[in-house]
């Protein structure tokens, strides 16, 4: 059983083999960003006064830093290419560096996050998955509208986060659809069958 790359786990009985690397990259991105986003929004965003006090707060800076970490992870999750990952990692490393400069420039931050998101979503289109790409950009456009326009007042940011929470399953789909993921998915399926016999 183990010689085929299968694993036995009492803690995760449905985990028959390690997930493909693109899926692990997506998972790592979600896990790394979530605590910092949660900390900023739950503890500080509503307590800090609007303006520089909020924009320059360390918790917001870390939220932005880890947005770029997740974008870096997603670049591998959607491309399966280490070269593309490294190119995006360089872009995001520069963005992260700028979060630690004394002056915070919100417009620059927004543009750089937008470029990083475009960078990690482009491979989905390059691989020809137009429908998935369209679904992702429908969600992103709704999020942009909520974030920029605040159409429902103070609730807009909460609805933005509820809407963007629809992205992870689509990004996992992109990671699973990669040709580099197929062999490991087939191994997991074979291991599931072997476990039943």
Image (tube, rainbow, N blue to C red):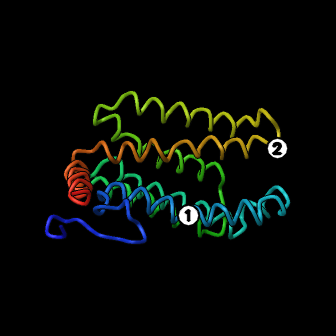
The number of discs equals: 2
Q: Is residue 125 above or below residue 102?
A: above
Q: Is residue 53 left or right of residue 181?
A: right
Which quadrant is the C terminus positioned in?
A: bottom left
The residue at which mark 1 appears reads as: 65
Q: Is residue 121 left or right of residue 154?
A: left
Q: Secondary structure at mark 2?
A: helix
Where's residue 189, x and y in %? 25, 51
Task: Tell me the crowding category of disc 2: few under 14, some 14 to 19, or many 20 or more residues within 10 angstroms, Cα based.
Answer: few
Where's residue 155, x and y in %? 79, 42
* Tag of residue 171: none
Based on the displayed image, in which of its 4 quarters is residue 6 positioned? bottom left
* Tag of residue 154: 2
Q: Is residue 170 above or below residue 103?
A: above
Q: Is residue 151 above or below residue 194?
A: above
Between 61 and 29, the residue placed more toward the observer is: 29
Q: Secondary structure at mark 1?
A: helix
Where's residue 174, x and y in %? 36, 43
Between 127 and 22, the residue placed more toward the observer is: 22
Nearer the observer, disc 2 or disc 1? 2
Task: Tell me the crowding category of disc 1: few under 14, some 14 to 19, or many 20 or more residues within 10 angstroms, Cα based.
Answer: many
């Amino acid at each position: 059983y183990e010689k085929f790359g299968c694993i036995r786990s009492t803690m995760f009985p449905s985990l028959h083999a390690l997930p493909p690397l693109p899926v692990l990259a997506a998972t790592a991105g979600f896990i790394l960003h979530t605590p910092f986003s949660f900390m900023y929004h739950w503890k500080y965003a509503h307590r800090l006064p609007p303006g520089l006090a909020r924009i320059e707060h360390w918790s917001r800076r870390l939220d932005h830093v880890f947005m770029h970490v997740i974008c870096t992870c997603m670049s591998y999750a959607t491309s399966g290419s280490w070269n593309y990952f490294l190119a995006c990692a360089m872009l995001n490393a520069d963005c992260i560096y700028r979060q630690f400069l004394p002056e915070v420039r919100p417009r620059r931050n927004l543009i750089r996050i937008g470029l990083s998101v475009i960078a990690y979503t482009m491979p989905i289109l390059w691989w020809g998955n137009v429908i998935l790409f369209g679904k992702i950009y429908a969600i992103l456009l709704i999020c942009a509208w909520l974030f920029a326009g605040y159409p429902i007042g103070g609730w807009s940011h909460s609805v933005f986060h509820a809407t963007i929470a629809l992205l992870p399953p689509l990004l996992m789909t992109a990671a699973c659809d990669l040709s580099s993921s197929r062999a490991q998915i087939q191994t997991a399926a074979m291991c599931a069958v072997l476990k039943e016999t």
